[in-house]
Amino acid sequence: MKNADLIKVFSETYDRYPSVIVKAPGRVNLIGEHTDYNEGFVLPIAIDRYTTMLVSGREDKMVRLYDLKYKESDEFNLDSIEHTELHRWSNYQRGIAKVLKVLMDKGYKIGGMDAMIYGGVPEGAGLSSSASVEIATLLSFKKLYEIDIEPLEIIKLARKAENEFVGVECGIMDQFASLLSKEEYALFIDCRTLDYRYVRVSLPRCAFLVCNSMVKRELAASAYNARRRECKEAVETMKKYLSHIDSLRDITIKDIKKFGSYLPQETRKRAEHVIYENERVKKAVEELEYGDTEAFGDLMNQSHRSLKELYEVSSEELDLLVDTGKSVKGVLGARLTGAGFGGCVLFFLKESSIEPLKEKILEVYQEKTGITPQFYKVIPSRGAFSEQISV
């Protein structure tokens, strides 16, 4: 929807005009899956799909919400924020408001707001719609109440909201990418130090195509949290032999080859994925900067194989999409992106192969699953931003 249309709906809903518009993108992780919460390395891009929020401040503590996708309203008071099962989509706004109490305790005067949400990031697809909502909500409060807060603090607060209020033990990558990405670049992030740098990914005659399997997964109810626990168990066991380690990030390939036999087989597989994936991310940065598209694509293929066989977060549908895609000439790499268990596959391919790939997938995937997938050609895009509205 155009901004003018959104403003019209807002004014009809609240009988007033919005003062600020905020946009926060979803993201696709090029490589580095399940490494972020293990203090490792990731390489995401923001995509040209945004959560848009139109907001106006209030003189009281009420937060009134209207979600265009669900066509539902909800509200809560900043002095009494509780989790809701009735309008679960609003738990992201509630969670952000809850963590902002830290700033209110420091003397910031934060009031309520009227907000309208327009979600342009597909949900349940592994494109981080939740992080885009969290960042958009936090920037809305920041803009309305002139909160002096640094980007890294915004990222940490958004993650805290999802971990502690929504109940998903995500790492920090999604919020990071939604806020700090920029056009034509990926973010190479060290999830321990939070150091980051930009890596150009605008490669001649190449593109990124996301294919949504249309198999949704509820992340909080999935095996995601179980994988986190397995990684922690691996670290605790390995500490007996490598006393200096704090996370899987600290374990080298040489270490896992030497001491991995002391881990239960399943736990060892989880650890091996993370350790080798961290190396793939660092190698991917080198290949992108060198411009070696085939080498980068091969690293993506290796990543998917590891996610399937070692981390065991793929699915029959995701594997079918990957295998079908790899049979099409000009497809350089394919891997699941996001937590897995459903969601999307990311293809790195020649521009000229986009239509042949779509046709092949539609033919094979529909025949074998009865599901019609969706496609999104994505480009590395800018991170979240806000603008004043003049009406």
Image (tube, helix red, strand yellow):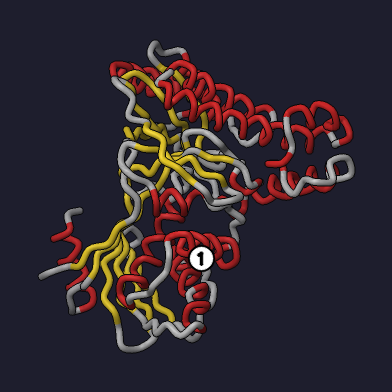
Q: Secondary structure at mark 1?
A: helix
* Residue type at numbered disc 1: Leu
**Residue 311 left/right relative to 285:** right
User: In the image, is residue 302 above or below residue 246?
Assistant: above
Based on the displayed image, in which of its 4 quarters is residue 143 positioned?
A: bottom left
Residue drawn 57% across and 40% down? 41
Query: Percent position (x, y) of residue 155?
Result: 48, 59
- 54 vs 387, nearest the viewer: 387
Query: Percent position (x, y) of residue 34?
Result: 61, 41
Based on the displayed image, in which of its 4 quarters is residue 187 positioned?
A: top left
What is the tally of numbered marks visible in this picture? Answer: 1
Query: Percent position (x, y) of residue 17?
Result: 17, 74
Query: Percent position (x, y) of residue 356?
Result: 32, 16
Outermost residue, bottom side = 60
User: In the image, is residue 152 above or below residue 345?
Assistant: below
**Residue 272 left/right relative to 332:** right
Residue drawn 36% across and 34% down? 374
- 178 vs 213, nearest the viewer: 178
Residue drawn 58% across and 53% down? 170
Residue drawn 50% across and 69% down? 95
Q: What residue is shown with label 1?
A: 157
**Residue 244 in sight from this viewpoint:** yes
- 322 vs 232, nearest the viewer: 232
- Quadrant of the frame with the C terminus: bottom left
